[in-house]
Amino acid sequence: MRKGTSSRAPHGAWLWWTAAVAAVLVLPWYGLERGVLGASWAEARPALFQGLSGRPWLLLLIPPLLLAAWGIAARSSRLLVWAGGLALAWLVAEAFGLRTHGLRLDALAAIFEGSAGQPPLGWGALFYAVTAMMLVAYGLAWRGWCGGEVFTVGAIGLVCGSILVFVGYPIACVLVSAFQDNAGAVDLPLFAEKIADSSIWGLDCLAGARGCGVAWNSLALATIVGVLSTLLGLAFALISARTRFPFPRLLRIISMLPVITPPFVIGLALILLFGRSGMVSNLLRDLFDLPRSRWIYGMPGLVIAQLLAFTPISYLVLLGVLKGVSPSLEEASSTLRSGRWRTFRHVTWPLIRPGLANAFLIAFIESLADFGNPMVLGGNFRVLSTAIYFAVVGAAHDQGQAAVLAIVLLTFTLSAFLLQRLWLGRRSYVTVSGKGDSGLPARLPHGLRVACYGAVIPWLVLTTAVYGIILAGGFVKSIGTDNTPTLEHFLTAFRIEHGVSGWFLAGSAWSSLLTTLQVALMSMPLTAALGILTAYLLSRQRFAGRALFEFMTMMSFAIPGTVIGISYILAFNVPPIELTGTAMIMVVAFIFRNMPVGIRAGIAGLAQVDKSLDEASLTLGARSAATLRRVILPILRPAIATSMVYAFVRAITSVSAVIFLVSGEYNLATVYIVGRAEFGEHGIAIVYSAVLIAIMVTALLAIQALVGERKIGRREVEREAAVAARPAPAGV
């Protein structure tokens, strides 16, 4: 057989080729504002009819399909790859080269005169792109790529393509927009002026002025929060893993609260406690005649709010790391007559360095990306996330300035990743091997135990007060000043009335709540599916460019939510891909924002599944798609549940990534709450937050009941053995 050909049956390739032909001949090529059923024939014409009636560049979409048919009929992989590649290349060229906004190919526009004003792409273009990619996948598989598995090659291509479109392209738009003026022309001196602006890098605070530049403010806040939350999280983890804490379930509940709490609600609760009219401020004035002040607004309040929000995340990270430290190493140190302090300093501390670095990195990035708390508590202390917001929605409406600020914020987060890698270096931190792992963890030194309790107990008291305000503050007239119970705030938000046409939702919050649930339920399965599929490709497949592929999949985790929001506005507000003002843009943002968690959960689950199961399935004649569906997915049910829960919860609680993407028709709960807080309607904001927390707790409990828990590990066995060895009561 000639090189570049294949004896594989081409039935699947013919099906994809038929779908590509249907995309050109049947489906509407451009987007329809009123949907397919509400559109006229002129609006819903396919690409062929569009090309014959004034858009001749669309006719050039047909020759690659003819070449693909020749390649399939001749079973030539080379022709099929060229045909699919040419189809994709021309689709990208005509879509981006003939547009009126942003970068365009003037030479191409000169060839097709009158091409300006191309509408955004629609379903026909989407199906054409997917089918062209699959034709390339068939050609590459016929040439032996990925063991000849069409499913694997196609999955890699589709995942890479979606990441390029919905992560790489928006970030590129931010980078390009930063170098342009308001008319869209490249202006390097203007970029230099904006990037060096004193509002970003000013150090007037060192001379006694009111504040520094937003970059230094953000760095200082993130560094302080990162260090303190890591230390507090370590104190929690040490108490949980190395002491007999009397309330272990309390720590578990607290570790779950930040996940299901909207990020800015803690700031609202702190205002109700420590603001000028707060409960604590009034109490201190009445008892000690202390004047009320606004100290909670600015750096102090933001540090407290972010510590309350991010410390439990550090605790979860460090708890897992501490439980992974082999007790035999600490016992060996004790056997060599090392004291508790020396053992902790020279054995335990070096082994938990990766956990400390990860906890700091997460808190640092979360602090930089936090939008809600600075919006509520920032006062005159401005940070990058709020500066980006006001650059877009403020009086100046300078998207170029917002892009410059987004680049600064993105640089900080990527630099944090690099510094973490440098700090950890290439040392080995492996403590769990294939040998038996016996022994009990070393006890904490007395001084360290006292210090941990001294830090944790005040934090627990404050956290209890904050969440008490969140749960009760919306059901009194004015918390702290008039504590008369009332349902006024709840009914304002969630009233249901009966009218001439029957019952209807009259509360002001219903629209945003229903939209939020709709978007969350739409994004949840798609996020889990894309994350688990990507995890399977990374764990079970070997292909060229795998390291770059993994970096691309994790890029969206390193990008702060505010940067995601502004990049989506710049990328998808104009053709060829126009999504702003729709619910779909929020669904897409949530999918690619939360996908890395599903990837990591899937990789962790697959690491516990021996590859011999995959090999047995392949030996019995199953292809990769069938193996994934029948063997891998049933085993990964816990990872799938984790990904779905995280995607659902984050879609409900996120604000920074979607504050720019909401519209009058599609508003979200978190944005509604921020708006009520800005207008001083704290009761409505608090009661809405309590409703969201109740919804998410219900969802978590339901999923946990369906999936269950898998209990493994040495400590669980030891606990059961201790219970079994306990003497029975008299008379039993």
Image (tube, helix red, strand yellow):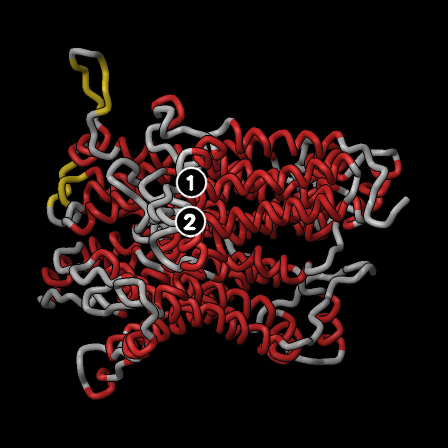
| The quarter of the displayed image where residue 505 is located | top left
Q: Tell me: residue 194, above or below residue 646.
A: below
Q: Quadrant of the N terminus?
A: top right
Residue located at (60% from left, 30% from top)? 19
Spatial distance from mark 1 to mark 2, Cα to Cα? 8 Å
Q: Which residue lies furthest to the bottom in this view?
A: 207
Residue located at (82% from left, 41% from top)? 613
| Whole-percent x, y for residue 165 in the image | 50, 51
* Observer-nearest of 68 and 218: 68
Residue 552 is left or right of residue 142, and the answer is left
Q: Tell me: residue 501, above or below residue 228.
A: above
Q: Name the residue under label 1.
A: 55
| Cβ atoms at labels 1 and 2 below 8 Å apart | yes
| The quarter of the displayed image where residue 729 is located | top right
Query: Secondary structure beneath disc 2?
Result: loop
Residue located at (71% from left, 40% from top)? 151
Kindly identify the amino acid type of the residue bearing the numbered disc 1: Arg
* Residue 726 shows in the view: no
| Whole-percent x, y for residue 438 in the image | 77, 60
Q: Name the residue under label 2.
A: 112
Residue 393 is left or right of residue 723, and the answer is left
| Whole-percent x, y for residue 726 in the image | 69, 44
Q: Quadrant of the C terminus?
A: top right
Instruction: Tell me which label, 1 or 2, sits earlier in the chain.
Output: 1
* Residue 109 shows in the view: yes
Q: Tell me: residue 87, above or below residue 215.
A: above
